Image (cartoon, grey):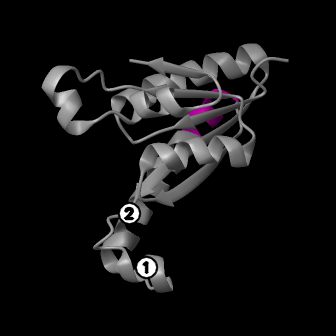
Amino acid sequence: MLYQHILVPIDGSETSVVAMDEAIKLAKALNSKITVVQVMALDPYIADAYVKTGQTNELIERTRTYLLEVLEQAKQKFANEGITVETKLLEGFVVHEEIIQATQDLKADLIVMGSHGRTGVRKLVLGSVAQKVLGESHIPVLIVR
């Protein structure tokens, strides 16, 4: 069967909602397993002690709490459609690398994610997680807007 395990990276944006909607359609049509992930991007300066010793701080914990709430909302969205999902909060310095690593760790065979559709100078300055995932992933990536 094609696409038995779909990874859906989210960031709390409207494009994440669109990506979840597409993943719901695919999961229903293909009877696929879904894992929704969100990456807590660690700032090297703020998270230095956390990375080296595991000692957390208030900013990290507030961020973690917020991101877990976003994941719980995503889980509920899928549940409302009759789909059970797993959720994972990933941590790392480079968001797209964490997403790609998660596909390998979880043995996902499709990534469905949103793109903010930035172009021109904004894309060059801000970069694009979706573009980097698309360029470096070894599995198919469905980008939705």
Which quadrant of the structure image shows residue 50? Answer: bottom left
| Between 113 and 101, the one nearer to me in the picture | 101
Q: Residues within 10 Å of mark 2 (few under 14, many from 20)?
A: some
Q: Give the main secondary structure, helix, strand or loop, of the magenta stretch.
A: helix
- Percent position (x, y) of residue 133? 48, 33
Q: Give the residue drawn at x 40%, y 42%.
A: 11
Residue type beneath disc 1? Tyr
| Between 100 and 77, the one nearer to me in the picture | 100
Precedes in sequence: disc 2 or disc 1: 2
Instruction: Identify the residue under disc 2.
Output: 42
Q: Is residue 99 left or right of residue 84?
A: left
Tell me if residue 113 comes above or below residue 71 in the rendering. Answer: above
Q: Is residue 79 left or right of residue 32?
A: left
Instruction: Identify the residue under disc 1.
Output: 50
User: Does residue 117 belong to the magenta stretch?
Assistant: no
Q: Give the residue drawn at x 24%, y 24%.
A: 118
Residue type beneath disc 2? Leu
| Between 24 and 90, the one nearer to me in the picture | 90
- Percent position (x, y) of residue 42? 38, 63
